[in-house]
Image: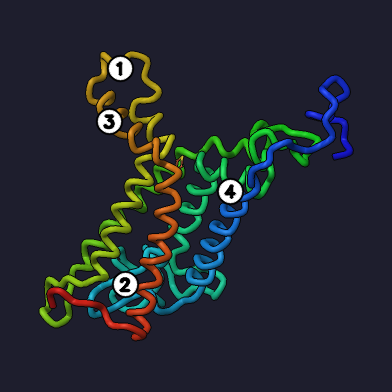
Amino acid sequence: MSQATGVFSPSRAKIQQRTLRTDKWWLAPLLTNLGLATFVVYATVRAFWGSAYWVPQYHYLTPFYSPCVSTACLPGSSHFGHWVGELPWFIPMAFISLPFLLAFRLTCYYYRKAYYRSVWQSPTACAVAEPHAKYSGETKLPLIMQNIHRYFFYAAALISIVNTYDAVVAFHSEKTGGFGFGLGNVILVTNVVLLWVYTISCHSCRHVTGGRLKHFSKHPVRYWIWTQVSKLNTRHMLFAWITLSTLILTDFYIMLVASGTISDLRFVG
Ligand code: FES
C-alpha cells in the first residue's frame, strides 16, 4: 500500500504491513465468491435454456421458469394464463419474476455484506486495510438504491405465493388423473418452505412487522410476530445459502426428469 491513507496515515503507528493477521482471513471471501459464481452461472444458463423445465405427467415446474406467461410455454405450464406471445431468445420465460428475485437478493443485507467484502473488498476481512483510497459507503448513486430493499421483499413474498401454488398443483399424476405424490413433490415443497423461511427472516420483514414500533406493550400481536421473525433473522445468512442450494437442486432434479434422463420416484400414482 503506497497511499498514505487509513492505517498508513502519517499520524498512525508506523506498521508497513496491510495486516498483522496470521490466519487465513482470505478464505471466507474466496468461498463466498466461488459460491456466488456457481449460482449465478448455473441460474443464468438454466434461465435462458428454454427447455426441460416442465414435467407434464406430474405437473412439476422449476422455480426458474415460474410464472410462465408466454404462449410459447409448454402446454400446462402456464398456471396464471398467457400474457405475452413468443419471446426472443434473450428474454427468459420467467422474465416477470427473475428481475425482482435478483434485485431482492442483490439488495439483501446479508448479500451486501458478502459481496462488499468478497467482490468489492470493502473490507476484505476485519482489520485488513482496504485497497480503496476513498469510501462513500451507501450515500451516493448507485448504492443509495439499496434502501428500496423492502419493495423487493414485498415482490419476493408475492413470488413465494406463486411458488407455493406451483408446489401444490404438482401433487398430480397423469395415471390416476388426479392426486399423485413423488420425490419431485418432496423436493419442490422443501424448496418452497425454505424460500418462505428465507423471505420471512429478511431484515426488512423484521422492521415492517414490529421493528419500527416504539411501544411493544401496546402491540401484543406485532410484538409476537417480531419475536418470531427475529429468531429466524438470527440465521438469515444460513437461509440465504441454503435456498441458493435448494433452488439449484430443485431445478436440476426437474431438468433431469423433464428431459427423460431419470424418472421420478413415485409413491402414489
Ligand atoms: S435482508 Fe436479506 S432478504 Fe431482506
Q: Which label is found at residue 225?
A: 3
The amino acid marked with disc number 1 is Phe
* Earlier-in-chain disc, 4 versus 2: 4
What colour scheme does the image use? rainbow
Label 4 to label 3: alpha-carbon separation: 33 Å
Label 1 to label 2: alpha-carbon separation: 45 Å
Determine whether the residue tagged by mark 4 lies in a helix, strand or loop: helix
Tell me if label 3 and label 1 are in contact, CB under 8 Å: no
* Earlier-in-chain disc, 3 versus 1: 1
Q: Which label is found at residue 77?
A: 2
The percent position of residue 105, horizontal first and vertical second, equals: 49, 49
Task: Determine which residue is flagged by label 4.
Answer: 28
Q: In the rendered image, is residue 121 in sight? A: yes
* Earlier-in-chain disc, 4 versus 1: 4
> Considering the image in quadrants, where does the N terminus appear?
top right
Q: In the rendered image, is residue 122 in sight? A: no
